[in-house]
Image (cartoon, grey):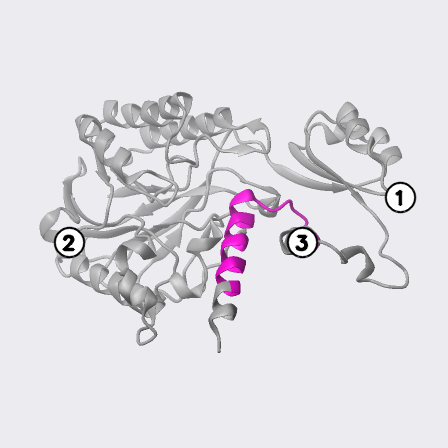
Amino acid sequence: MRIVHTSDWHTGRLLRTVDRIGEVEAALDGLGRFVEREAVDLVLVSGDVFDSLTPAAEAERVVFGFFRRLGAARVPSVVVAGNHDSAHRVEAWGQLAELAGVHAAAIPRPPERGGVLEIPCRCGETALVATVPFASPGRLVTALELASGDTDPMGVYADALRDLIARLAAGFRDDTVNLLVAHLYVEGAWISGTERQVTLGDQWAVPPQALPSTAHYVALGHIHRPQTLRAAPAPAAYAGSVLQLDFGEAGQVKSFVVVDAHPGRPVAIARVPYEGTTPLGIVRATLAEIERDAEALRRRGWLQVIVPRERPDPHVATAVRRLLPNAVVVRDELPAPPDDPLASRRGLAPRELYARYVRERHGVEPQEDLLRAFDTLLEEAGHDAAAEP
């Protein structure tokens, strides 16, 4: 059985003001050609098909067009909802998508309620697919447990996921290809920094040992950096995102996973890069250097341009974009204050200080979701401090 694992399309996501739906469509077109050419038997999509809970019609056209193509090729697929997807919408369009061989899992369910799918494939073998859509901490941990000082809510969350996975995997058989598709964070995975931070961190995670040792392959979504989990008891990998979603991912090679699996035998795993996407790059250069190298820089994809200067210049972004229409982010790099390194930070609000830290530490502009998460945590920390005797 030949399986393709893809994930984290984030269809409809903007890079600042740049619409990248065309890039996702090109990548899925290349993926579709691979599925047709290489006689793929099953496609697994491990969440975050869309970038928002209410995707635009153009984003839905691209996604549903791809699934229709799989249906026309008689290739079944399994899709689990991610944290960016609306579980209600996935459940709704999944009913119609079944006509194209799409099995959509919107919320975590036990095996007796559809949590495990049995899918006969045209190769003559059968796949048992255990599904774990994204489960928010609020879904698995009750308000009483969150409020109680007697329980560890992060531990409750991890235990609930571990128990669910164990129940789903209990039905795996020796005569089937056994698969787990999940959208979650596994401890130790390397993040890119573009994931929604409030759902990450080792607190809201499962240990690698929670993954079933009896699976031929574990298809994971949620983390955007492509990677294999070597600590897992069975072959397990994050496919990663289709696009380099922000400049923290510049240089990452985005790819889908190809798995050849047969009952009772070890799997063979390979990665195939996506086609048709535009790379992101970070350029540090003076205006004179940019003007000199503009022709080459215009061919380097979407750019973050850092311009070293002695003093701020409100016109530098306009000057850079006149030379480089592909410059998405432009910012000055000013020399550090010579005497008092803290002087430039005095009077800044906590949110502004944190945004500056992200820029200086990671070289990227902080995502609005990340800043909102910081505001929420700061407010909670303030409430906790006020409540102390």
Q: Over which residues does the magenta segment extend?
A: 360-382
Left or right of residue 110: residue 225: right
* SS at badge 2: loop
Circle nearer the viewer, 2 or 3: 3
- Residue 386, image x, y percentages: 51, 69
Which mark sits nearer the N-terminus, 1 or 3?
1
- Classify mark 3: residues with Cα within 10 Å, few (<14), some (14-19) or many (20+): few
Q: Is residue 287 above or below residue 265?
A: above
- Residue 143, image x, y percentages: 29, 60
Q: Which residue is mark 2?
A: 110
- Residue 239, image x, y percentages: 41, 47
The kind of residue tagged 3 is Ala
Q: Are marks 2 and 3 in contact (CB under 8 Å)?
A: no
The kind of residue tagged 2 is Pro
Q: Which residue is mark 1?
A: 311
- Residue 40, image x, y percentages: 29, 36
Circle nearer the viewer, 1 or 3: 3
* SS at badge 3: loop
At x 83% / y 30%, what residue is drawn? 315
* Quarter of the image where one finds residue 348: bottom right
Q: Is residue 380 above or below residue 271?
A: below
Instruction: Check if residue 37 falls in the magenta segment.
Output: no
At x 85% / y 41%, what residue is drawn? 312
Q: Which residue is mark 3?
A: 349
Disc 2/disc 3 C-alpha distance (Å): 47 Å
Q: Is residue 233 visible?
A: no
Instruction: Check if residue 370 falls in the magenta segment.
Output: yes
